Image (cartoon, grey):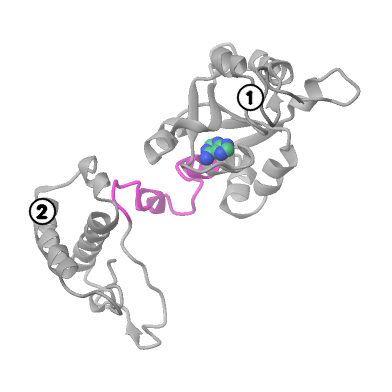
């Protein structure tokens, strides 16, 4: 898949795309990430991309023309049968989630448009955006970090990007639940033991323990996820037990208590 990021800080995107799993996936040719700078579509001596807002108020607004010209140039270079998904990153967008990452990972060409300053002249969004997304209810200095969040989450879903594709399917959230806790050697750390069942090599018991731990964590921290998660009849039974367990614990004095493994 091809990802094109429109940003006045292309070096931020390029630098983040070199190391780690993302860099390796690009190297393997599983995806490409190209950063396009709207400044290259300015005609004035200062390569100006922002201006004061109509109606007054502080801050600057990203001008329509340089960004629109950058988008036009890339759109014209696309194969005739490809219509890229054009995603604007903004704190006013719809919340980003795994389902969207899954959808985006099926696109041949994905454009990510990063705002800076107070935002982008809204006429560009109206003309080009197919989506507008936010990565959370906080304001960042620009859309570059959110774009990298999207790129990373999409890349993980591309076949071959992770050494072991099963690990993307096991990812916390991908299954609709939070992940179970994980442990590695040593078996004992500062008096805390790894849960016994994980040492037994009994795959079915390990699978059941992990599922229960994931359900417990989700119930305690993100019960909203349970409304959408695909749950079996066995899961529902386990959840009934866990609800009773959690109610009991909430009723008892918790101060000073160490969290259990599944919390
Ligand atoms: N740009 C600035 N803040 C943002 C956020 N929270 N999500 C997406 N884009 C942004």
Q: Quadrant for the C terminus, please.
A: bottom left
Say which of 227 and 34 sits in front.
227
User: Which of the two discs, 2 and 1, sits closer to the camera?
Assistant: 1
Look at the magenta stretch and give its main secondary structure.
loop
Residue 242 vs residue 138: left or right?
left
User: What residue do we see at 67% from left, 33% from top?
Assistant: 117
Q: Which residue is mark 1?
A: 120
User: What residue do we see at 30% from left, 47% from top?
Assistant: 175
Q: Could you say where residue 89 lies in the image, as x and y percent from the top left? A: 55, 32
Magenta residues, start to end? 150-178
Task: Please indicate, yes or no, whether residue 30 appears anywhere in the rendered image.
Answer: no
Q: Could you say where residue 155 lies in the image, as x and y percent from the top left? A: 51, 42
Q: Which residue is mark 2?
A: 234
Say which of 112 and 161 sits in front.
112
- Quarter of the figure with residue 119: top right
Examine the structure image and report whether residue 220 is included in the region drawn in magenta: no
Residue 8 vs residue 115: left or right?
right
Examine the structure image and report whether residue 159 is included in the region drawn in magenta: yes
């Amino acid at each position: 898949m091809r990802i094109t990021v429109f940003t006045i800080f292309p070096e931020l995107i390029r630098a983040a795309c070199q190391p780690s799993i993302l860099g390796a996936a690009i190297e393997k040719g599983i995806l490409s990430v190209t950063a396009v700078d709207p400044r290259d579509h300015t005609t004035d001596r200062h390569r100006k991309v922002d201006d004061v807002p109509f109606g007054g108020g502080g801050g600057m607004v990203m001008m329509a023309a340089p960004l629109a010209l950058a988008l036009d140039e890339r759109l014209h270079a696309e194969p005739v049968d490809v219509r890229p998904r054009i995603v604007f990153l903004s704190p006013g967008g719809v919340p980003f989630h795994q389902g969207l990452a899954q959808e985006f990972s099926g696109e041949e060409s994905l454009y990510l448009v990063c705002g800076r300053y107070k935002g982008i002249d809204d006429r560009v969004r109206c003309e080009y955006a197919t989506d507008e997304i936010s990565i959370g209810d906080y304001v960042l200095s620009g859309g570059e970090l959110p774009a990298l969040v999207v790129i990373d989450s999409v890349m993980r879903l591309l076949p071959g990007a992770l050494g072991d594709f099963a690990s993307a399917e096991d990812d916390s959230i991908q299954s609709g639940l939070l992940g179970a806790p994980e442990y590695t050697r040593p078996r004992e750390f500062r008096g805390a033991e790894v849960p016994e069942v994980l040492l037994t090599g009994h795959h079915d018991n390990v699978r059941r323990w992990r599922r229960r731990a994931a359900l417990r964590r989700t119930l305690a921290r993100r019960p909203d996820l349970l409304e959408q998660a695909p749950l079996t009849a066995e899961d529902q039974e386990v959840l009934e037990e866990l609800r009773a367990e959690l109610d009991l614990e909430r009723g008892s004095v918790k101060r000073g208590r160490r969290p259990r493994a599944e919390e």
